[in-house]
Image (spheres, rainbow, N blue to C red):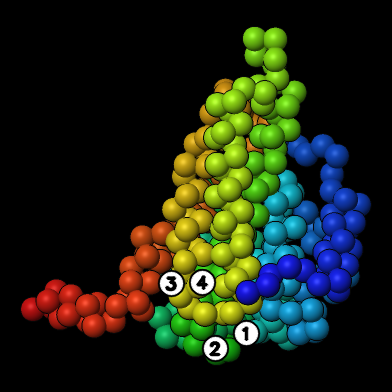
């Protein structure tokens, strides 16, 4: 499979990069979550969340958009709008919040969103958030978090838009794309640090042991990125599970290494590494985490063995 970008896709991402450069803040305040309404609106107004963008430029484009945006230190709602909204609810306004499971659960971007997607056991329903009160929660994982003040009323006004299984597949693809981009942003910030931080009279990044571990992290992130691009192009359930499971599994070691290279500074709000590492900690457990994706993958790959084990547990 050739996943190299064609001229149109390259031009599209170049335009997006210019928008990110124009709207990216030179200095971010030391706070865990900094949703950039200005950047979010600029990306939307440029047409990067239009359904026609993905039809005209190919199925891999959502991944490219998420790779570019989610690697930034400032936060916008990009993954659900890029992967889920075009297929499930293209006519509903964004930003889009997603609540999986119980309708009273906290959700990312809920206070900033115009629509909310409820993903239950069998169906996915969507509701307009205008007129519904929302409570902002502590953004512990560096995402703006919120909860519906009256989830029952909001859910009662929702409409069925798709089956839950179809939406969960797109959500998992969105998690893989966002996690790959988040880990890349974290790696880029650490690379800048080891170029300037000096130990024993030399830049920290000049030591071979540091170079080897950073190269390993870069290789793992790159592998996850290409697995996600392949999954986005094919939309095959097994490919999506592989991409998500791989990234969620290797995220722990990557984050450990990156914080090691930052030393004590990596544990403070002084350096922006926390913006990516906190997000990655949440994403690596989304939708059940790596163990859940691997079990689902095994069920698809070996259905007879999975059915036999299920029967044995039921006895």
Which of the marked residues, 3 or 1, is nearer the chain's N terminus? 1
Residue 312 seen from this side: yes
At horizontal 33% and vertical 68% (from top left) the residue drawn is 295
Going by the picture, which residue comes out furthest to the left? 315
Q: Residues within 10 Å of mark 1 (few under 14, many from 20)?
A: many
Quadrant of the drawing holding the C terminus:
bottom left
Residue 118 seen from this side: no
Q: Quadrant of residue 20?
A: bottom right
75 left or right, relative to 158 = right
Which of the marked residues, 1 or 4, is nearer the chain's N terminus? 1
Q: Secondary structure at mark 2?
A: strand
Per the image, the residue denoted by label 2 is 162
Q: CA distance from mark 2 to mark 4?
A: 19 Å
Is disc 1 in contact with disc 2, using a CB cutoff of under 8 Å? Answer: yes
At horizontal 86% and vertical 71% (from top left) the residue drawn is 7
Q: Secondary structure at mark 4?
A: helix
Per the image, the residue denoted by label 4 is 240
Percent of width and height locating residue 182: 63, 51
Which of the marked residues, 1 or 2, is nearer the chain's N terminus? 1
Which of the marked residues, 3 or 2, is nearer the chain's N terminus? 3
Count of marks placed on residues: 4
Q: Residues within 10 Å of mark 4 (few under 14, many from 20)?
A: many
Identify the mark at residue 101; answer none if there is no mark. 3
Q: Quadrant of residue 62?
A: bottom right
Is disc 3 in contact with disc 1, using a CB cutoff of under 8 Å? Answer: no
Q: CA distance from mark 1 to mark 4?
A: 17 Å
Percent of width and height locating residue 75: 71, 53
Above-or-below relation of 269 to 55: above
């Amino acid at each position: 499979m050739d996943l190299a970008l064609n001229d149109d896709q390259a031009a599209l991402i170049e335009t997006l990069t210019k928008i990110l450069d124009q709207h990216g803040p030179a200095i971010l305040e030391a706070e865990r979550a900094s949703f950039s309404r200005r950047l979010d609106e600029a990306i939307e107004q440029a047409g990067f969340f239009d359904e026609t963008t993905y039809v005209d430029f190919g199925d891999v484009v959502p991944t490219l958009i998420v790779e570019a945006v989610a690697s930034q230190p400032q936060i916008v709602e990009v993954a659900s709008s890029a992967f889920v909204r075009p297929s499930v609810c293209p006519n509903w306004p964004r930003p889009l919040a997603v609540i999986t499971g119980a309708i009273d659960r906290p959700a990312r971007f809920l206070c900033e969103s115009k629509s909310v997607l409820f993903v239950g056991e069998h169906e996915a329903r969507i509701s307009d958030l205008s007129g519904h009160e929302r409570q902002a929660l502590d953004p512990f994982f560096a995402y703006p978090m919120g909860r519906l003040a009256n989830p029952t009323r909001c859910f009662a006004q929702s409409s069925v838009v798709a089956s839950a299984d179809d939406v969960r597949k797109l959500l998992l693809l969105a998690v893989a794309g966002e996690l790959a981009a988040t880990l890349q942003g974290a790696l880029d910030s650490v690379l800048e640090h080891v170029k300037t931080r000096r130990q024993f009279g030399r830049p920290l990044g000049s030591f071979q042991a540091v170079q080897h571990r950073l190269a390993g992290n870069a290789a793992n992130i790159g592998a996850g990125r290409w697995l996600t691009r392949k999954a986005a192009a094919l939309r095959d359930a097994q490919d999506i599970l592989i991409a998500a499971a791989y990234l969620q599994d290797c995220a722990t070691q990557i984050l450990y290494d990156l914080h090691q290279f930052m030393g004590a500074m990596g544990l403070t709000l002084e350096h922006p590494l926390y913006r990516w590492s906190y997000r990655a900690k949440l994403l690596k457990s989304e939708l059940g985490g790596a163990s859940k994706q691997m079990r689902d993958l095994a069920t698809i790959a070996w259905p007879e063995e999975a059915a036999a084990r299920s029967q044995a547990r039921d006895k």
